[in-house]
Structures are given as structure tokens and as C-alpha cells.
Image: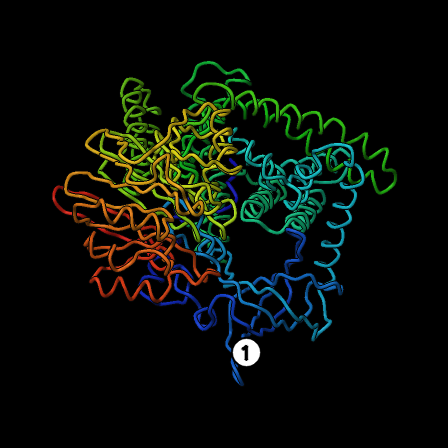
């Protein structure tokens, strides 16, 4: 009699998910599948003084602050209390706080950001998928109930002790943060450079606490206990308890939860004499995770983790049956290929590019990852008795990590190491997965010729991009400027790119926008003047591996240090540097950019005053881009303007000292676009300026209010849109 698989079928998984979606759609239950704010979150504004009470359920250190995650939260509103979902407290509180403590906090509210540009990370949705409403920067914190959870505090203390051990045994090596992230789920010391390097190589998943780690730890422990003479039930029960404790200790991330559930199912199958079915186990794990919060359906970690398991469980076995070669290397390659095939649309939807050599790198990384993990665990445990012994045990793992870094650096230098593809549309993703199912069906029937055709269609569908329309986008970069122009001939331009109130604006706002649009390089970057709010993001891009062909700077006689430093950086990076002066034109593919200001003999009163001013013409569109021009330069421009404009990019973020009535009367524009940051310290846009624009009967659009502003030329029509709310 054959053994029956323990668990439910994958069909039940699909039915349950469909029911959850239907229930929420019909409003039959308060499942948090929508992105509507909770009552408490809707009552507060950003950076507002508020008071809350709640129970601590998790804590971690990040950016030299203690983060307290609290549940059973109540927001005080006068004499009333409003229930909230979970929240995060950011504090430097020195008093010992235990998990389970009831606390009262007074501080400034911190609402999580919704994206204001295409490609920007959605902090709001990320935290909502964890049922977290908002954060508070604590000013006052009191423990009002000292009851605590013994088990969780013991695990938390153990994790902190292990982290301290890692610090002791890795003082002389650079891999400390990597080991702590991989073994303990503590990413506080996982450097951004190493994280980006591993991401570019497509192996970052191996360094997050996930199924790989829990599977290695759980199965290794189970086999050790079996060799010690323990029976299946005893060894399995101990393994289950240890794995649950480990998942708890590392923060119960979605990938760790999935792996924990699947490990429990595998152990129960052995203990009860049943077979283990990976797809049924994945289905059960998905149901349990989604029952806790259905919004995990839009969480990238959830999609990648479960997508990888579907690749291993559904695609890889068919590929192995199809390929006649059965060597271990071939099987490992097909396993990596199976995961890639399933997760590719998720990767492109989240990161907009594909690390070309990731499949090959994973062939090296994954088989020996168990040695790195084992080395790290033994090292931090041995450090309890001897730091020298701990350092010795961790040595093997540190050498392997250095090998990983070397391989990623080599791959990074190879041609086409990363291919920018852009964010696929939902319809493209749906068609891709339909074709994938067809391909697997044909492979089972051994119809290889048709299968190859479908593979070509799959790749073509997912990477296809609609023909370019002429588009000008004023990015929301906070207090700064960043304008991206996409021409119909495929030429891409950027005018300025910087901010004074958004950190790493190039990395987190400009580059994601470019890559999500499938823009593989910038043909021309034009810097109006070298102030920080116009150049900071541009410098980040120059220092990255993103390609810029040409940089155009204002042609002026007076060059200060900021100007010459940028000029030198561009030349050292292999970027051609040109200079724009009054009367110069850049004409390409129907686009004409004419420089109206400055000229080499111009005597500016400041950097702002020598800002490059551009007159843009494309078809029916006439646009005036004024940088941060001031009164003196503006008067000279007013005298030479001979035509009306459709759109004015208002100078200096809406300062009252620019954009005079005489200037507005001369250009006679219909729309005014202002780029400035929310609650900026300058008070931009100034009320006097807004009144002048209103008197000129101009429609005003401001990036801080509507997000990135996009103008598309469609024949003789101009289409305007703001990104916020999409």
C-alpha cells in the first residue's frame, strides 16, 4: 500500500486565495487587502505630536536607534482612545524594555511614504503588508506594565548575545555584517555596498534568513539526532521546536515563516509515515501566511519566496525529465533555471533589471552556502567559550564570502552583466505565465519544437516595450529639480538631478524611475548650475555603473570648486563634457533645445544667476525651463523672448524673487510647474509667486502635491498627469 502525501493539495490553496479575495471584494469581512488607512492612521498628520499605548512584540536595532514594534495599540485623541494596527516606535531610550511590556509613548508621528514617482519603493504598502500603520519618533517613553514574555525575551537575549559574539570574532575581518544578516537576520551592519553587489550578482537571496537556512539547520539537526539513536518522532519533535525558535529569534520574516511551515510538514510526514509533497506544503504555507495578512500578496519577499518554491517543485522536475543528461551540475543548473523562470516577472516588477550571470553564480553559491552557514553558527557558539576558537571556526566561512564577492565583482565587469528591461505591465505578466504553463505541458508531451517557440514568445512578451511617445517628466525629488525627457527616436535626456531633503535621491528616486521605464542609459545630462539641489543625484548616478554619454554644463567664465569638481568627475568617468552658451542648440529626432542663458561674458551675481535657461520645442509643445534663474538674468531673457510658451518650469522652486509679472506677461504660458519639497524650510512656493501665477491665469502643478508630473505629446494634444494616487 503506497504512502499518502501529508497535507492538502495545491488546488485548495487556489480556492482559498480566491475566497479571500471574493470576501474582501464583497465587503463580508474586514480583511486588509485594500490600501485604505485605518481610522487611527487617518486621524493623524505627518510629524504631529501624538500619544499611544501598546504592547511590545518585537525589537531590533537599526541606524543606531532601537525600534520597538508594538501591538494592541490605542491612539489617544483627547478623552477618547482609537484602536490602531501595529506601529513602530523609534527611540534612544536607555531603560531596558522587554517583549511583552505595556508602554506609553509620546512623540512625533511618522507616516510611511506612498511613491510619488514611477519605480519608487512603496514604503506605505510594504509596512501595510506587515499590518503596521505608522511610526513614532519617541520623545517620552514610559513602561506602564512590566509583564513580559519569558520565551520571546529569552530568544531575543540569546540573539543579542550571538550578535555580540559575532562582533568579538569578526573584529579583523569585513564580513561581520554579512554573517549577522545571514545567521541572525540582523541587517544593521550589512553594508549597503555589499548588499548592492550581491543584488547585482543575483545572489542576495542567499544572505537573508530563508528556506535555505532553515532547511539546512533543521535537516542537519534532525540527521544528527537520528545518528545519536533518537527515533523519528523524538528527533522530528526536537527539530520542529528548534526551527520555530530560530524563526522567532530571527524576526519571523515571510520567507522564514514559509520555510518553517514546510519544515514542520516534512517532519510530520516522516513522523506519521507519510510522503512529503513539496507543492502541497507550499500551498499550506501560503494559506497560513495569507490568513495572517492577505496583503502579503503584494509583498515582494512573499512573491519571490513562494515563486522560488514553485519553480523548484513544479518546473525543475519537468526540466530534469526533459534533459537527457543527469549529472549533479546539470541538475543544479536546471534547478536554478526553474526558479528563474518562475520569478523573472517578479524580479522585473520589483527591480526592473536582470542580473545576466545570476544562474551561473548561484551554481557556485548555493552548493557551498551550507558551509558558510555552519561556519557562522559554530563560530558564534564557540565564542561563548573562546574568542580564538570562534574566530578559527568562522575562518572557512569568511574565505567563502570573499570568494562570493570576487565572483560578483568579476561578473559585474563582464559585458551585459545587468540588463535593464523595465517594469512589465500586468497583462504581459499574465500572458507570460499562461505561456509558461503551455510550455510545461508541451515538455511533458515531449514536443520540443513547439516548446522552443513558446520560450521565444515568453521572453518577447515580457521584454517588449511600447514605442516611445515624446514625454517630459518632472520628477518629485523633494527640494530640488530632476527632469527626464524621452524622445520618440529613443534618445533620453535628463536636466538636473538633485535634492537637499531626500537622501540618496539618485539611488532611490531617479535611477528607479529610469530603470522602471526601461531607460538603459542617458544620452545627454544637462546641469543648469552646480548647487546641491540640482547635482546630488547626478553625482550618485555618475558614481554608479549606470551609463551617461554626455554632460552639458553652462559655458561661463567664472568656475568655482563645485563646478570644476563635477567637471573633473565626469571626465574621469569617461563622460564627454560639453558647454552650453546663449544661442547654442541641441537638435535631435524632432526635439530642439535652445540655450537662452548664460553666455561666457555674463557677470553672474550667484550660481543661481548663471543657471542654464532652455527653450524646448517638440511639435506643438513649447516649454521654457528656467533652472534657478534670478532677477538679473530673468530681465535679459525677458528682452529676447519672442513667442508664447505652453509650459513654464518656474524658477528656483517657486521663490518670490523670480518669475516677475513682466516675465509672465511676456511668455504668456498656460501651465506653470513647480518642483519643491513638502514642508521645505524655505516656504516654497511663496504665496506672492502663486498670486502672480494666478493673476496670469496659469494652471499650477506642484510636485510636492501631485508627485511626478508627466507631459506627453499626442499629435496636436498635450496630456498632463501627476503620479500620486496611481
The residue at the point 51 percent across, 32 percent down is: 543
How far across and down, in percent of the image, does residue 724 sit? 34, 56
The residue at the point 40 percent across, 42 percent down is: 603
Question: Does residue 238 appear to the left or right of 574 in the view shown?
Answer: right
How far across and down, in percent of the image, does residue 610 sit? 39, 43
Q: How is the protein colored in the picture? A: rainbow
Which image quarter: residue 468?
top left
Q: Is disc 1 placed on a helix, strand or loop?
A: strand
Question: Does residue 402 appear to the left or right of 157 in the view shown?
Answer: left
The residue at the point 75 percent across, 33 percent down is: 227
Residue 466 appears in the figure: no
Residue 151 appears in the figure: yes
Taking depth in this image into account, of 494 and 132 the one nearest to the observer is 494
Instruction: Look at the image and tell me in which quarter the C terminus lies.
Output: bottom left
Question: Does residue 81 appear to the left or right of 435 in the view shown?
Answer: right
Taking depth in this image into account, of 700 and 265 the one nearest to the observer is 700
How far across and down, in percent of the image, does residue 548 sit? 41, 29
Decide: few, some or many residues near mark 1? Use Cα within 10 Å; few <14, some 14-19, many ≥20: some
Q: Is residue 259 placed above or below 490 in the rendered structure?
A: below
- Give the total number of marks visible in the rendering: 1
Q: Farthest residue to the bottom: give it.
A: 79
How far across and down, in percent of the image, does residue 22 sit? 33, 59
Q: Which residue is the site of mark 1?
A: 76
Taking depth in this image into account, of 356 and 508 the one nearest to the observer is 508
Which image quarter: residue 384?
top right
Amino acid at each position: 500500500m503506497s504512502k499518502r502525501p501529508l497535507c492538502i493539495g495545491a488546488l485548495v490553496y487556489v480556492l482559498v486565495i480566491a475566497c479571500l479575495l471574493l470576501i474582501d471584494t464583497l465587503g463580508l469581512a474586514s480583511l486588509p487587502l485594500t490600501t485604505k488607512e485605518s481610522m487611527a492612521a487617518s486621524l493623524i498628520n505627518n510629524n504631529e505630536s501624538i500619544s499611544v499605548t501598546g504592547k511590545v512584540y518585537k525589537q531590533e536595532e537599526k541606524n543606531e536607534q532601537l525600534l520597538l514594534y508594538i501591538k494592541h495599540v490605542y491612539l489617544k485623541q483627547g478623552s477618547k482612545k482609537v484602536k490602531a494596527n501595529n506601529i513602530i516606535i523609534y527611540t534612544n531610550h536607555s531603560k531596558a524594555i522587554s517583549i511583552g511590556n505595556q508602554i506609553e509613548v509620546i512623540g512625533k508621528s511618522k507616516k510611511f511614504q506612498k511613491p510619488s514617482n514611477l519605480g519608487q519603493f512603496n514604503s506605505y504598502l510594504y509596512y501595510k503588508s506587515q499590518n503596521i500603520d505608522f511610526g513614532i519618533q519617541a520623545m517620552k517613553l514610559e513602561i506602564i506594565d512590566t509583564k513580559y514574555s519569558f520565551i520571546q525575551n529569552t530568544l531575543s537575549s540569546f540573539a543579542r548575545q550571538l550578535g555580540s559574539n559575532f562582533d568579538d570574532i569578526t573584529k579583523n575581518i569585513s564580513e561581520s555584517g554579512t554573517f549577522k544578516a545571514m545567521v541572525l537576520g540582523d541587517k544593521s551592519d550589512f553594508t549597503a555596498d555589499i548588499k548592492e553587489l550581491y543584488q547585482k550578482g543575483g545572489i542576495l537571496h542567499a544572505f537573508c534568513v530563508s528556506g535555505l537556512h532553515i532547511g539546512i539547520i533543521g535537516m542537519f539537526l534532525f540527521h544528527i539526532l537520528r545518528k545519536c539513536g533518537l527515533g523519528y518522532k523524538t528527533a522530528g519533535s526536537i527539530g520542529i521546536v528548534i526551527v520555530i525558535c530560530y524563526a522567532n529569534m530571527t524576526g519571523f520574516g515571510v520567507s522564514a515563516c514559509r520555510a518553517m511551515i514546510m519544515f514542520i510538514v516534512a517532519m510530520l510526514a516522516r513522523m506519521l509515515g507519510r510522503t512529503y509533497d513539496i507543492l502541497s506544503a507550499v500551498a499550506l504555507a501560503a494559506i497560513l501566511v495569507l490568513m495572517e495578512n492577505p496583503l502579503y500578496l503584494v509583498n515582494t519577499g512573499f512573491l519571490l519566496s513562494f515563486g522560488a518554491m514553485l519553480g523548484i517543485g513544479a518546473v525543475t522536475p519537468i526540466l530534469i525529465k526533459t534533459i537527457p543528461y543527469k549529472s549533479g551540475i546539470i541538475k543544479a543548473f536546471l534547478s536554478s533555471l526553474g526558479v528563474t523562470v518562475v520569478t523573472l516577472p517578479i524580479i522585473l516588477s520589483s527591480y526592473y533589471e536582470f542580473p545576466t550571470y545570476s544562474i551561473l553564480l548561484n551554481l557556485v553559491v548555493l552548493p557551498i552556502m551550507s558551509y558558510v552557514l555552519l561556519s557562522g553558527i559554530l563560530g558564534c557558539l564557540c565564542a561563548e567559550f573562546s574568542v580564538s576558537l570562534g574566530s578559527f571556526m568562522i575562518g572557512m566561512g569568511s574565505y567563502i564570502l570573499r570568494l562570493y564577492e570576487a565572483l560578483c565583482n568579476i561578473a559585474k565587469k563582464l559585458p551585459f552583466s545587468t540588463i535593464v528591461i523595465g517594469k512589465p505591465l500586468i497583462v504581459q505578466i499574465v500572458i507570460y505565465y499562461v505561456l509558461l504553463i503551455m510550455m510545461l505541458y508541451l515538455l511533458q508531451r515531449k514536443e520540443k519544437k513547439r516548446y522552443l517557440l513558446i520560450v521565444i514568445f515568453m521572453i518577447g512578451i515580457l521584454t517588449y516595450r511600447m514605442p516611445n511617445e515624446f514625454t517630459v517628466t518632472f520628477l518629485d525629488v523633494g527640494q530640488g529639480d530632476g527632469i527626464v525627457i524621452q524622445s520618440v527616436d529613443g534618445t533620453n535626456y535628463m536636466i538636473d538631478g538633485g535634492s537637499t531633503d531626500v537622501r540618496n535621491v539618485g539611488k532611490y528616486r531617479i535611477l528607479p524611475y529610469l530603470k522602471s521605464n526601461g531607460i538603459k542609459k542617458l544620452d545627454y545630462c544637462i546641469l543648469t548650475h552646480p548647487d546641491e539641489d540640482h547635482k546630488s543625484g547626478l553625482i550618485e548616478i555618475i558614481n554608479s555603473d549606470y551609463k551617461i554619454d554626455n554632460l552639458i554644463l553652462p559655458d561661463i567664465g567664472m568656475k568655482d570648486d563645485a563646478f570644476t569638481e563635477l567637471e573633473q568627475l565626469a571626465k574621469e568617468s569617461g563622460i564627454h563634457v560639453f558647454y552650453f552658451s546663449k544661442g547654442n542648440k541641441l537638435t535631435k529626432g524632432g526635439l530642439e533645445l535652445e540655450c537662452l542663458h548664460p553666455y561666457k561674458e555674463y557677470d553672474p551675481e550667484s550660481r543661481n544667476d548663471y543657471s542654464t535657461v532652455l527653450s524646448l520645442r517638440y511639435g506643438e509643445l513649447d516649454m521654457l525651463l528656467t533652472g534657478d534663474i534670478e532677477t538679473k538674468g530673468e530681465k535679459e531673457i525677458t528682452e529676447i523672448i519672442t513667442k508664447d510658451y505652453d509650459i513654464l518650469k518656474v524658477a528656483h522652486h517657486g521663490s518670490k524673487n523670480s518669475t516677475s509679472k513682466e516675465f509672465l506677461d511676456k511668455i504668456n504660458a498656460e501651465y506653470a510647474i513647480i518642483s519643491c519639497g513638502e514642508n521645505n524650510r524655505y516656504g516654497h512656493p511663496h504665496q506672492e509667486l502663486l498670486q502672480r501665477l494666478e493673476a496670469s491665469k496659469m494652471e499650477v502643478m506642484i510636485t510636492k502635491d501631485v508627485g511626478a508630473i508627466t507631459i506627453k505629446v499626442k499629435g496636436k494634444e498635450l496630456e498632463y498627469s501627476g503620479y500620486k494616487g496611481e
